[in-house]
Amino acid sequence: MPSVINDAYVTLVNNLLRNDYEKPWVEFKANLSDPQQIGEYISSLSNSATLHGHEHGYLVWGIENNTHHVIGSRFDINTEKVGNQGLILWLETQLNPKVFFEFSAIDHPGGRIALLEIDGALREPVKFRGEEYIRVGEHKKKLRDCPELERKLWNIFSLISFEQHLAMEQVAGEDVLKKIDYPKYFELLNIDIPMGALGILDALVEDKLVQRNDFGTYDITNLGAVLFAKKLSDFSTLERKAVRVIQYKGDNRHRTIKEQIGGKGYASGFEGLIEYINTLVPQNEIINDALRTQVPMYPPLSIRELVANSLIHQDFAMRGTGPMVEIFENRMEITNPGAPLIHVDRFIDHPPISRNEQLASFMRRLGICEERGSGFDKVILETELYQLPAPEIDLLENHTRICLFAHRSFAEMDKDEKVRACYMHACLKRVNREYLTNSSLRERFKVDEKSISTVSRIIRDTVEYGLVKPVDENAAPKVMRYVPYWA
């Protein structure tokens, strides 16, 4: 196999050689061809890279171990075999879970160097032939013989988030600035753009949107790409995470009027996304003081919060699917991949729990979504102010869907809709340290005292559904107060 002439890899090797001793994620060999040893090193270097906070481990041929002098090597993994099977294929079948590794032959000024670049372990230690290995200093050991390191490694797996993984590796500084919408980053943070490319890159590194690597270039993190990509399609693993907005004619999916797929990162494109959705939302005509006024069918604040939540709380591990907003003539459905981490009955009162806390925190920092714990409360409050049916939360297979309904009069709502509205009203009252009463529910539905018995029937239905309960069962009917079943 001809050598690869690549300045970036020469820089990488020189950076690895600068250390006075081998790092746990780097192994230098003058020569090594034993398949078993190579497999054990792949396991140990992958696990050690993760343990020490590195994206990759490196096995390097052609380096004298003690002196770190380049002596050159003709090793070529592509021509090595185990029996009749190629070494690469054999290694892949012996590693569990699968771990990506890539071989390169480098024309270094000191001689030809062979390098195996190995991805760090992601969710569990990498085994070779059923055994997990780790590097302790410059020595390879079985992980089970190092219980403290094993516990630490598993703790790291529990903390590694989607945002920390890389969307694109080995990107030159000038190309980072072509792919990341850094002007929008500084605009949303309301700070001045630094003078010079290095100052801009330093700010992006500080916020973990990009990171420096061993090649002397940069890696763009998932956090940086998903928030500030100029084009999400530049990042193959994130392209399907772009938001789809679909407008239908009528109340079903038979006829599509418009379909738009977002191109920008969530932060860069959020205001444009919300503005676009609002242009598609039907208008309601209301009459106040004999004046006709057009108002949006759904509260703009509710749309903004629910769309932001669909971005923040999605399960990025699900491939081939992303957030979607569907607009019908009688409802709007907002869907995201992944089941919620809290019960749907507790959306109003429970502090939010996100799979993607760094993403959620950054979105709040940018002012894109509401402060912790207040978002869904405001969605329900706005729904009541607009006199809409209560939102409906559906758990689909591996997806969560929230539906906003167009205005329907009290008489037009069915029993389930009235019970759902009663429950959510009780939750909203509880959050405000108040109680559901016949009077408060009449105010919610905008009905007068003539409807006391009707509203009492709704409350009784909600009690029978097990969604609310009386504070004092012995209280007189006129002063009965209710709380959600979980209170």
Image (cartoon, rainbow, N blue to C red):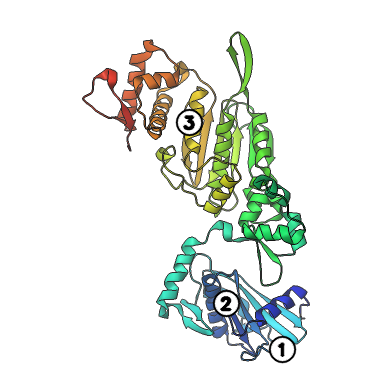
> For the residue carrying disc 3, how many other residues have a C-alpha within 10 Å: few (<14), some (14-19), or many (20+)?
many
Mark before the other along the chain sequence, 1 or 2: 2
Residue 71 coordinates in the image, percent (x, y): 71, 91
Q: Residue drawn at (76%, 77%), measured in percent from left and top?
A: 4
State yes or no: discs 3 and 2 in contact (Cβ < 8 Å).
Answer: no
**Where's residue 102, x and y in %?**
65, 73
Above-or-below relation of 275 to 454: below
In the picture, residue 33 is in which quadrant? bottom right
Could one spot residue 238 in this view of the protein? no
| Residue topped by disc 3 | 380
Residue at image point 37% right, 10% down: 450
Q: Quadrant of the N terminus?
A: bottom right
Q: Residues within 10 Å of mark 1 (few under 14, many from 20)?
A: many
Q: Amino acid at mark 1?
A: Gly
Which residue corresponds to mark 1?
Answer: 72
Question: Considering only order in the chain, which callout, 2 or 3, is on the residue closer to the N terminus?
Answer: 2
10 Å crowding of disc 2: few (<14), some (14-19), many (20+): many
Contact (CB < 8 A) between labels 3 and 1?
Answer: no
Q: Which residue is mark 2?
A: 25
